Image (tube, grey):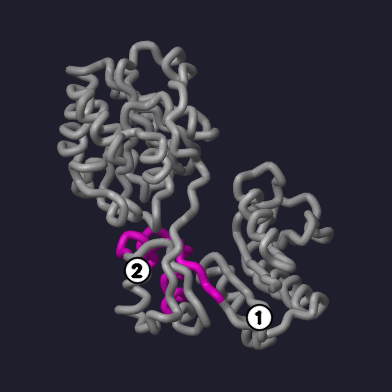
């Protein structure tokens, strides 16, 4: 079987990235896997990166030029590699922009199309976030019913596909995001403990610093906690456009909030006493799964994977959206009770 994939993940061009490793694993069970990646900053978009039966092409055009370049690359691959509509397929990682190109290729070649759904595009906050996300929502409503198969990362997204978009259930599959982290907790990580000695209790938030993560709610909670419990600290690992607003907010926490650049989160999990997710919405939220695998007690809003693998009070704590008071209470309950931390992490 040969597959043409359209992706926005420029990290696939890095042979050492985790995403690239996943693609090599996919290619190992296929005859050929060809990926067209939107990578405007790639140095060379004309020469594909070939690793065995995995071939990665960079579409370097910006804005509207991406659609034409990705379409030409995809069509060339289908024709040159002699894709068969009866044996091979096209897959795209979202409805817009990759899904648009994939659908046009389907129309041109007759190849079957699988569309993936990673984001809760139907969420009202998602639609209002930006004009780009509104376009994702509009194209999602148009394209998902026209795909031959849909992969949803959560049951919530799958239900929207069948109940609202009226896609036959047989065409919708639920396949969560794979987490490669080992389940064993391993030896405690000392790096973050040594770097932040005032923190006797560490909460962690490895995440993209974007508005939908609502990290400001956690920072404000630690501003309140710092007045009575200065030894409770929060380490935020990541980068993103919200950082410029978060850092001034953290200045009011008396040093209780620290920022770290993005890196391997496993070392942070091993140092942490709690994992926090304060998001307004998530498609799946891999961090929740990774924290549970690392046996870190989870405090989260009811988003993504929390609704599907967590039971409040049994293997984690679920708090209402935007409720900083409930977040403070949950953190203090874990801080005051090592036995609760042990029970939740064991159940996770």
Q: Is residue 39 magenta?
A: no
Q: Please tell me whether the stretch drawn in magenta is mainly helix, strand or loop.
A: helix
Q: Does any portion of residue 280 appear in the rendered image?
A: no
Q: Which residues are magenta?
A: 114-141
Cα separation, mark 2 vs mark 1, equals 25 Å
Mark sitting earlier along the chain (2/1): 1
Numbered tag placed on residue 23 in the rendering: none
Quadrant including the N terminus: bottom right
Task: Tell me the residue that label 1 is attached to.
Answer: 105
| Vertical position of residue 158 compared to residue 184: above or below | below
Q: Is residue 227 left or right of residue 73?
A: left
Look at 68% across and 54% down and name the residue there. 24
Q: Is residue 232 left or right of residue 133?
A: left
Q: Is residue 322 left or right of residue 15?
A: left
Horizontal and vertical percent for residue 212? Answer: 36, 50
Secondary structure beneath dot 2 equals loop
Q: Quadrant of residue 292?
A: top left
| Vertical position of residue 340 compared to residue 154: above or below | above
Q: Is residue 177 left or right of residue 87?
A: left
Task: Tell me the residue that label 2 is attached to.
Answer: 122
Horizontal and vertical percent for residue 271? Answer: 41, 24
């Amino acid at each position: 079987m040969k597959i043409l994939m359209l992706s926005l993940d420029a990290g696939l061009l890095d042979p050492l990235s985790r995403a690239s490793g996943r693609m090599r694993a996919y290619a190992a069970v296929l005859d050929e896997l060809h990926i067209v990646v939107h990578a405007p900053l790639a140095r060379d978009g004309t020469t594909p990166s070939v690793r065995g039966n995995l071939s990665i092409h960079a579409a370097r055009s910006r804005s509207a030029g991406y659609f034409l370049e990705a379409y030409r690359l995809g069509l060339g691959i289908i024709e040159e590699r002699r894709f068969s509509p009866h044996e091979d397929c096209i897959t795209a990682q979202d409805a817009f922009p990759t899904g648009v190109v994939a659908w046009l290729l389907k129309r041109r070649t007759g190849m079957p199309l699988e569309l993936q759904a990673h984001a809760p595009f139907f969420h009202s906050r998602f639609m209002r976030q930006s004009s780009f996300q509104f376009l994702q929502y509009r194209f999602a409503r148009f394209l998902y019913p026209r795909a031959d198969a849909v992969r949803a990362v959560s049951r919530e997204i799958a239900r929207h596909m069948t109940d609202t978009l009226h896609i036959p259930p047989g065409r919708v599959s639920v396949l969560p995001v794979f987490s490669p982290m080992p389940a064993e907790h391993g030896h405690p990580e000392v790096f973050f403990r040594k770097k932040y000695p005032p923190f006797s209790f560490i909460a962690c938030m490895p995440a993209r610093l974007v508005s939908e993560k609502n990290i400001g709610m956690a920072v404000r909670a630690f501003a309140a906690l710092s007045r009575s419990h200065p030894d409770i600290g929060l380490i935020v690992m990541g980068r993103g456009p919200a950082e410029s607003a978060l850092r001034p907010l953290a200045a009011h926490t008396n040093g209780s909030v620290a920022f770290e650049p993005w890196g391997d989160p496993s070392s942070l999990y091993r140092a942490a006493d709690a994992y926090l997710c304060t998001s307004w919405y998530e498609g799946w939220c891999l961090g929740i799964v990774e924290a549970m695998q690392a046996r870190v007690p989870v405090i989260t809003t009811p988003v993504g994977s929390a609704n599907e693998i967590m039971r409040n009070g049994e293997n984690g704590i679920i708090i209402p959206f935007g409720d900083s008071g409930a977040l403070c209470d949950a953190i203090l309950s874990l801080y005051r009770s090592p036995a609760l931390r042990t029970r939740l992490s064991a159940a996770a």
